[in-house]
Amino acid sequence: MTTLTVASREWSTRPADERFTSLHALAAYKNYEREHSRRRTLANRDLTIVPSTTDVFDIAVTGPNGNPASLTNWSYNQLSSLSGVPGEYIVRSKMPGALAANNFNWGLHHARTAESVSVLLRQREDKSVWLGALNGPNYGPVWDSEIVETLVSEFGDGVSGEWSVPGEFSKKLTSVTKENTTLYASDRDMWVFLADETNRIEIQDRRAGKSSSLARGFYIGNSEVGAKRLTLGTFLFDYVCCNRMIWGARDSSEISIRHTSAAPHRWLEEVKPVLKTLKNSSPAPMTEAIREAKKTKLKEDVDSFLSSRFGVSSAIKSTHMLEEGRPIETVWDAIVGATAYARELVYIDARVKIEREAGAMLAKLVPNKAELIAL
């Protein structure tokens, strides 16, 4: 078991205007952004930086049509990287807009070779135009609005259904407020954490011979401007406290997708089906599989069993001993040890490989319902 801090980090860093009290409100915000955004592929030579006395950075970006677009903090940093100009120094030194524009233009038009750039433009409610992002030509955006609309389709408002903003210490929230919400979004990203604390999974002999139960949860985050990957994490857990720490988490699994040209396809083929499975699945097969795994003794040497499936043995045994206080004896012990070990791995591919093998081991114990227990 472990404590997940990812939700607490989001909760502790989001300002009030990035907090939403329902998926419907979050969807309305992201749909408006999508409807008032467009992407164009231009050459870096087509972009020109001009002085501006009305923008926060004292510069604006113009394209072939000569219409200026203001910069966000994110797009300013991307512009600095694209042009090779130290943007932090320009801001810190309070460099005049005209001189800053000359520096950026030299970087865009002369210091770098001609190359294509994916430009995201947004129009705000006051009709002002903003540069949302400057990405590479092979950037494959998955729109935040598409993800949120899928969440609405599967889970409703995220408040009143079985899958909702998690309660505090397993007690359902009387109302979702900006103080306790786990629904977040800004002009650069979105992040959502929902849980099913109604249909808990019963686990026999979990602690000192006593039974207990776990809830199912997932988080999903994305950035259509390139600030973060598209990430879906699923897990079982005990409870969430007031500062949104996830206690007693186990059997966690994560899908992480870079925004390459294949990202929209991977969203459709790898992530979206998991959300549908979570919505439609019952915890009963998971309970049955766990019960079977806990009573199924390993039929071969522990080292051989672990090495043949995960490619590593001693580290998994040590991790299990540290977390559970006893050696590996059953299939469930092996799954718990392997997933706990996987959480310590730095590289995502290696972690996912072990987590998938552990999930497959559990699924085999209820073969005709395997698709329902894959988290």
Image (tube, grey):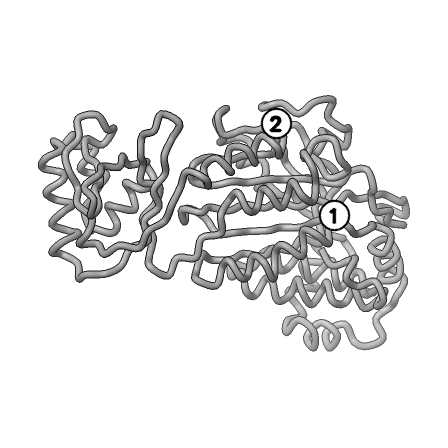
Residue furthest out toward the front: 65
Name the element at disc 1: helix
Q: Which residue is rendered at x = 85% and y = 59% of the image?
A: 289
Nearest the eye: 166 or 225: 225
Residue picked out by circle 1: 279
The amino acid type of the residue labelled 1 equals: Lys
Front-lying residue, 189 or 306:
189
The tag earlier along the polypeptide, 1 or 2, is: 2
Residue type (three-letter) at the residue carrying disc 2 = Thr
Marks 1 & 2, CB-CB < 8 Å contact:
no
Asked if residue 349 lies left or right of residue 354, the reply is left
Residue beneath the point at 79% across and 44% down: 214
Q: CA distance from mark 1 to mark 2?
A: 20 Å
Q: Nearer the viewer, residue 36 or 241?
A: 36
Q: Position of residue 220 (x, y in %)?
A: 59, 46
Which element is circle 2 on?
Answer: loop
Q: Residues within 10 Å of mark 1 (few under 14, many from 20)?
A: some
Position of the C terminus, as image quadrant, is bottom right
Which residue lies at the image location 74% right of the left edge and 48% below the top edge? 279
Question: Where does the image place residue 150, in percent across and percent down from the top left?
Answer: 62, 46
Q: Which mark is residue 212?
A: none
Q: How many numbered marks are there?
A: 2
Q: Which mark is residue 21?
A: 2
